[in-house]
Every structure is written in structure tokens, then in C-alpha cells.
Image: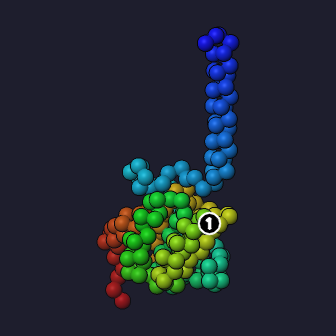
Amino acid sequence: MTDSAALEVLGAFCALNLMLTVAMARRLREFGEHLTPLQPGAGYSGDHSSFLLPRGSVAPDFTTTSIDGTQRSRRDLLGKPSLIAFLLTNCPPCHKQVPDLLRYAPTVASPANVLAVISGQGEEADSLASALKGIATVVREEEEPTLGRAFSVEAYPTFYLLDDNGMIQSGAPTIHRLAVRAADRQARHPVAAV
């Protein structure tokens, strides 16, 4: 092979590499809004408290519409304990949490006070909504994660347990951690018997 032929082959490989790099960058930019800085359970085992609203803080005000057309707001959750789950369709740890959520939610709140917020579109969103419909009021955020932003969700899944006054009792990246944190808090601050 001559030097000029070798240079042509090398040039072709460089051009192909550049085209693939540009295509990958476009694809990442296209799905960038659905990427999360961390997906708990996917390799990160540190403390997630920096991603969560602090215990004792008032849950943010919100108004949203469920998939069945019901308007829900923070005010609707007052008077009873509430559970809010933030799930992302293309998040394997979110899908792994669904069975635990299905078991845990009825033990802490009525379906009217369990809010499942699903970010994403398509069959995965439909599947999550279908699985959660009996135990939760399901909200789909297909375009803008409005509720996710209100609750400062930076990683998926994220779960919050609210007390009957709408205060954050506990927050965690898994149902198990949420239950442990809530039980620990209850043990340290028992409610006085009436």
C-alpha cells in the first residue's frame, strides 16, 4: 500500500469516527433531560440526603392532574400521612422499587394519599401507571417534571413520606430506606397517646 493510499484510509477512518462522535453527542443531548446525575441502586451507595428535601420542612405547594383527570394539590394531602413516589420510565432502579412500593404504600397511606409521579412517555410509563393505579393517585409528567422540580428531585427513584400536616417526615431513594428512616424517626420521636 502506498503512502497516499494509507493516508486516504486513515482519513476515511477519522471522518467516520467524527461522524459517529457527532451522532452520539446529538443523541445524548436529545435524551439529556431524562438523564439523572445519579440513579440510586445503580452503583452509588453513599448518603443521598444531599438530594432530598430536609426532614421537618413543609412539602412544596403544588397542583397537578392525575391520569384519571382528578385535580390534586398539597392541600388535598393534609390531615393524613402521605407517600409521594417519583419514578422515571427509563430507570431500572425505579422498576425494581415498584413491588416494594406496592407492599409498603397501603401500610402508611390510603390510595388517595399516595401520589405516584411518573416522568417519561410510552409503554414503560403506561406499564408503571397500570401497576400503581390501585394503590396510588398516578400523575404522568411527560414533558416537564413540574412536581419533580417542586420537590427538588435530582435522582430517581425518590420517595417522600409526609405527616398529616404536610411536613416531610422522611425521604429516601428506596422504599426500604424510607421505611427504616421513618421507623427510626418514630422511635426517636413517638407520638404521645391521646
Q: Which residue is at a point 67% across and 25% down the rendered structure image?
A: 12
Quadrant containing the N terminus is: top right
**Residue 30, horizontal then vertical, whole percent:** 67, 51
Q: Which residue is at a point 65% across and 10% down the rendered structure image?
A: 3
Identify whether 51 is placed above or below 181. above
Q: Which residue is at a point 52% across and 65% down the rendered structure image?
A: 87
What colour scheme governs how the chains and residues are painted in the rendered image of this protein?
rainbow
Q: Is residue 173 left or right of residue 72?
A: left
Question: Quadrant of residue 14 in the image?
Answer: top right
**Residue 128, horizontal then vertical, whole percent:** 51, 71
Mark 1 belongs to which amino acid?
Answer: Gln
Which residue extends farthest bottom?
A: 194
Residue 143 in sight: yes
Between 52 and 189, the residue placed more toward the observer is 52
Identify whether 143 is placed above or below 108. above
**Residue 58, horizontal then vertical, whole percent:** 55, 70
Between 90 and 156, the residue placed more toward the observer is 90
Question: Quadrant of residue 193 in the image?
Answer: bottom left
**Residue 85, horizontal then vertical, whole percent:** 50, 70
Q: Is residue 141 left or right of residue 100?
A: right
Which residue extends farthest left?
A: 187
Quadrant containing the C terminus is: bottom left
Q: Is residue 162 left or right of residue 147?
A: left
At label 1, counting other C-alpha atoms closer than 10 Å, the crowd grade (few under 14, some 14-19, many 20 or more) is some
Which residue extends farthest front?
A: 1
Identify whether 26 is placed above or below 132. above
**Element type at mark 1:** loop
Residue 169 in sight: no
- How many marks are shown on the rendered structure? 1
Residue under numbered circle 1 = 121
